Amino acid sequence: MDTDNALLAFAALAQPTRLEAFRLMVKAEPAGLAAGELARTLSVPQNTLSTHLAILARAGLVLSERRSRSIVYRANLGTLSEVTLFLLKDCCGGAPSICEPLIAELSMPCDCPETSHG
């Protein structure tokens, strides 16, 4: 990821509603969330949410898919990975042992409730 794309992603996430929407979509992977459900959960009007989702999509952070009469939004985990690696690529000036606690934290299983996917 280059600096311009990283800045675009950071700018998209630098707003409370967009950050919370993105975090909700990450939690909802791989199923995603319908736009209406996101709007209700975040207590924002659908037209306002639509603007926020468009900004996240332009930054490559979300993907959308029409399912019947709904548009379902999903976090683009590939871009999330690229942004995270952009931040950590030169971690600790060549002393990776300094980053080991962070890597260990990221490697821990999530405490998310089990969901059935099917």
Image: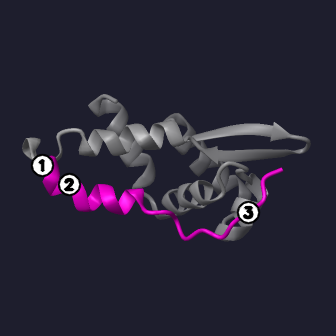
Query: SS class of the residue under badge 3?
Result: loop
Is 84 drawn above or below residue 65 in the view shown? below
**Pointer 1 residue:** 92
Q: Earlier in the sequence, mark 3 or mark 1?
A: 1
Is 113 drawn above or below residue 14 in the view shown? below
Is residue 98 highlighted in magenta? Answer: yes
Question: Which residue corresponds to the image point at 23% horizontal and 56% vertical from the top-left?
Answer: 100
**Label number found at residue 99:** 2
**Pointer 3 residue:** 115
Position in image of residue 106 (x %, y %): 38, 58
| CB-based contact (under 8 Å), mark 1 and mark 2 | yes
Q: Hey, what amino acid is under mark 1?
A: Cys
- Badge 2 density bin: few <14, some 14–19, many ≥20, Cα 10 Å: few
**Left or right for 62, reference 7:** right
Q: Earlier in the sequence, mark 2 or mark 3?
A: 2
The answer for how far apart the CA atoms under marks 3 and 1 are is 37 Å
Q: Quadrant of residue 48?
A: bottom right
- Res 40 visible: yes
